[in-house]
Amino acid sequence: MNILILGSGGREHALAWAALQNPKCDRLIVAPGNAGIAGIAEVAKLDIEDAETVAWFVAENAVDFVIIGPEAPLAKGVADLLRASGVTVFGPNADAAMVETSKTFTKELCDVAGAPTAAWARFDDADAARDYVTAQGAPIVVKADGLAAGKGVIVAETVDAAHAAIDDILGGQFGAAGASVVIEEFMQGEEASFFVLVDGTDVLPIGTAQDHKRVGEGDTGPNTGGMGAYSPAPVMTDAVAERALDRIIRPVVDELARRGTPYSGVLYAGLMIADGQPRLVEFNARFGDPEAQVLMMRLGAQALDLMQACAEGRLAEARVNWADDHALTVVMAAEGYPGSYEKGTPIGGLEALTGTSSQMVFHAGTALRDGKLVASGGRVLNVTARGQDLQQARARAYAMCDAIDWPGGFFRRDIGWRALDG
């Protein structure tokens, strides 16, 4: 089978790594890829948000299966055109992907489906939004309504901070994504990520994870795209998972199908859990990053079979075979991230870290310059390891981090602290 994966980050490196474990994979192309992906697969320069270009490339290269990694191509309707062309594709159509691309859409969807989530209000007028925040008080959550590359969410500890966030969003800091602002109740509890595959009607849970969004140790400082993750999530007990399926995921999936926009692909539910009761924080229409790295490390070759079954509408017959293991990933980021940071700093030491079924360094933002590996983004490497327990997985991951020679980077030393350190 010839496979095309769209994307260029750590998530796509992990998806490519998992696909290559499966004997079904004859040829693997990743577009546009990165320096790490180029070491295990073909890479192609391609505008992955241009549906016509992607469809042409698929036809020219006799691609059998397309896996869409990031959210932007989904929003641009790449999956729509590929499906209309008869291509087997993993990822929802643009209308269904609105569960991620519009906060308002998801909130209204939850209201209709009766899915528990935070109280909310939407505004496109800054004065009205500020008045609402003043009345509600803080802490409170302020979000850009549209896609903002994971950066359009501000947890405001004070009313003044919330007012400033409103001004930033409606003032254009996040471009078109900030044409309107969604303000939500601040939910107390422990956050976890729940991943399910959906083929329009059937739902198959495929794993849980917890990530660390804050840049600083002890979960302090500004939000980032994610500084590390581990799987499974201890807070996601079987009982909590079943409640999330019954009260949130299945009702939403049923409502999307009822509207004539059935969901097909991975549905990532960010949940807040308090006293064993889950409420929805957000949906994403693709695998999380860096959660995908720990999920793929644990799933291995079967990940491709599961994604193919999902894309072909065969989830009712699919099963997930979980080993009794754990995985943890540490994000190495460029100094200054999530603010301004320098690109082009050299990275050494990776040649000694051989990838195995128990450890991998997934590349998120790297490039080759004059034959040397350099950083080309904010989040640059995802150092990932499996273990019999989380403690072993963490020890292996941090041993790898310490072997990497990158003076221009930094990483948190406490990934997994909620589960391991209390």
Image (cartoon, rainbow, N blue to C red):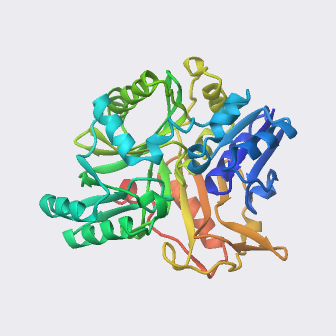
The residue at 39%/30% (across/down) is 252
In the displayed image of the protein, which residue is found farthest to the top? 317
The residue at 36%/28% (across/down) is 242
Image quadrant for the C terminus? bottom left
Note whether 295 is above or below 175 in the view shown.
Answer: above
Note whether 323 is above or below 152 in the view shown.
Answer: above
Q: In x, y percent, where is residue 262?
A: 51, 26
User: Which picture quadrant has residue 348?
Assistant: bottom right
Image quadrant for the N terminus? top right
State the residue in front, 80 or 110: 80
Note whether 232 is above or below 182 in the view shown.
Answer: above
Q: In x, y percent, where is residue 268?
A: 47, 41
Q: In x, y percent, where is residue 141?
A: 29, 58
Please indicate, yes or no, whether residue 228 appears anywhere in the rendered image.
Answer: yes
State the residue in front, 102 or 230: 102
State the residue in front, 96 or 114: 96
User: Which picture quadrant has residue 404?
Assistant: bottom right
The residue at 46%/65% (across/down) is 174
The residue at 63%/32% (across/down) is 307
